[in-house]
Structures are given as C-alpha cells and as structure tokens.
Amino acid sequence: MALEHPVDVRAVARRFGRTAGVNGIDLTVAHGEIHALVGLNGAGKSTLLRLILGMLRPEAGSVRVAGSDVARGGSWSRVGHLIDAPLAYPAMTVRQNLRAVATLHGIPRSLADERIAGLSTEFRLDEYLDVRFGRLSLGNRQRLGLAAALVHEPEVIVLDEPGNALDPSGVILLRNALASRAARGSAVLVSSHHLDEVARIAHRITVINRGRVIGSLAPDAVDIERAFFSLVLADEEASS
Ligand SMILES: Nc1ncnc2c1ncn2[C@@H]1O[C@H](COP(=O)(O)OP(=O)(O)OP(=O)(O)O)[C@@H](O)[C@H]1O
C-alpha cells in the first residue's frame, strides 16, 4: 500500500455564495516537501489552508492531516501553523508566550526552554525574549508567530503568507527555517504572493484561481511571473 501523504486533500469544497471560497480541490504535501500555493487576492488560498487546519468545515470532500481525518478531530499536536496575525498575549513577554505555547503542547519546561533558546537564535529574537509581545514591531511579532508554530517540532507546517511583515533578513531566516524543517522530513505548505521567493524555496508550486487548482509552476522556470499570469489569464478567459 502506498504511504499516505501527511497532507491529503480530496475534492474539498467550501463555497461562500456562488463563486467565492474553494470548489473541488485535490492537494497533497509529502514528507520533506515544501509545497507553495499562489494565486491572486481572493483566489481561495486562505480558505483552503483553513479547511486543512480544521478552522472551516468542508461542504464536500475530505481532508486528512498527519494521518487523521480533520472532520474527526485531526491530530493537532503534529501540526504547526500560522494564519493571520500570531496568537499571543500582548502583556506577556516573548519568552512567556513561547513557554505558554510549549505548555499547550505538553512539552516539559526544560525541553521547552532549550527549544525556545534555539528558536530565538534562529529567528533573531534573543534580544526581545523579555520584551512584551504588545511592544514588538510587526516583523518581530511575525518572527514570534513562526517560532511558536515550530516549537513542538511539527510533522506538518501550514503557513499563510509567512513572509508578511518580515524584513529582507527575516525572509532569509524564514527560507532557511523552512528548508531545514523540510530536510528533516516535515511537510510544509505555504501560501505566498512573492513568486520569486516561492521559486527559491518551494519544491512544488500550485496555482489557485477562483477556488480551483488551475495548474502548477516549475520553481526553476525562467520567467515565473509570466508563467503565472498566462495560467491565470487563460483561466479567466475560459471562465468569462
Ligand atoms: N468567511 C467568509 N465569508 C464569505 N466569503 C468568504 C469568507 N472567507 C473567504 N471568503 C471569500 O472567498 C474567496 C477566497 O478568499 P481567500 O481569503 O481564501 O482568498 P486568498 O486567496 O487567501 O486571498 P488573499 O491573497 O487576498 O489573502 C474570496 O472571495 C473571499 O471574499
């Protein structure tokens, strides 16, 4: 029997009105793979990620993540995610927030502190460990959100626009962080608007338009932007 992918989405649909949402998407992410979703604003990327994370219920289709059916509860201890703004307590420091997340995942304090030390070095948060979340800049909040998503060393990582608010050095840290997690076997699914960045990090790039998968882009394509727009324009013409 073929091994199951850690993310396995089949014919999933969740519509909002007649055209919005997602409408019949199949998608997989393998262990060790970085799979990127790209599409115009409103294409359905976040909706798909929310369905995968059990934040939305599908009207049709199935979603399996880390070996569990999301409709039956999922196995969230094996999944790390960042969707929208990081969930953190503004009055607590970076360290306290990361400890709180680690506690929720059942990680003992000494191991949590070891991981927090590693992640704060990785995301250059060392000097902010004792600063309250509410006082952090937007980019450092995002760095904290990424560290929090990774503190339990998840098998599946799902990130919506993870490069948002990051400065160029943050983008490089993110790139390295995802590459190293994938190299250790995690399945990584990210949405992004930055085609060049996606081309650097992703093994597979799926294009979504109007809630459907309309094709894929080769990460090593010479002009990825042009390839993206040709796919989207062809789909728009076919839909009109
Ligand atoms: N809760 C909701 N209620 C109604 N419509 C929604 C809801 N969530 C998403 N939509 C609609 O579904 C479509 C897809 O939205 P989604 O947020 O998934 O797109 P996206 O590809 O992530 O866009 P962006 O790149 O702008 O973040 C949009 O038309 C959006 O307005």
Image: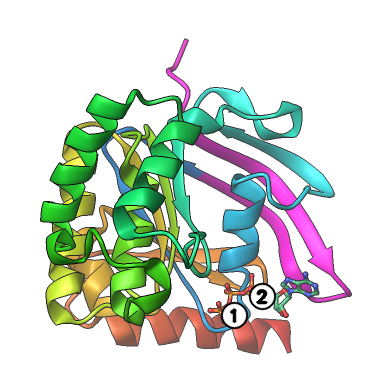
Predominant SS along the magenta part: strand
Nearer to the camera, 210 or 34: 34
Q: Are marks 2 and 1 in contact (CB under 8 Å)?
A: yes
- Residue at image location 76% in from the left, 54% down from the top: 13
Q: Earlier in the sequence, mark 2 or mark 1?
A: 2
Please give the name of the residue rendered at 37% of the width and 26% of the height, measured from the top-left corner: 107
Q: Which residue is mark 2?
A: 210
- 210 to 213, vertically: above or below: below
Q: If the picture is divided into quarters, which one holds ligand 1? A: bottom right
| 238 shown above or below 204 | below
Q: CA distance from mark 2 to mark 1?
A: 9 Å
Q: In the displayed structure, does residue 127 sit left or right of residue 101?
A: left
**Which amino acid lies under the numbered mark 2 shown in the image of this protein?**
Arg
User: Is residue 3 rendered magenta in the image?
Assistant: yes
How is the protein colored in the picture?
rainbow
- Determine the secondary structure under disc 1: helix
What is the x, y in percent for residue 108? Answer: 34, 23
Q: Position of residue 66 (x, y in %)?
A: 49, 28
Residue holding disc 1: 235
Res. 206 mark: none
The amino acid type of the residue labelled 1 equals Asp
Q: Could you tell me which residue is drawn at 39 percent across and 36 percent down? A: 102
Magenta region: 1-27
Q: Which of the 4 quarters of the picture holds residue 228?
A: bottom left
Percent x, y of residue 62: 71, 37
Q: Residues within 10 Å of mark 2 (few under 14, many from 20)?
A: many
Foreground mark, 2 or 1?
Answer: 2
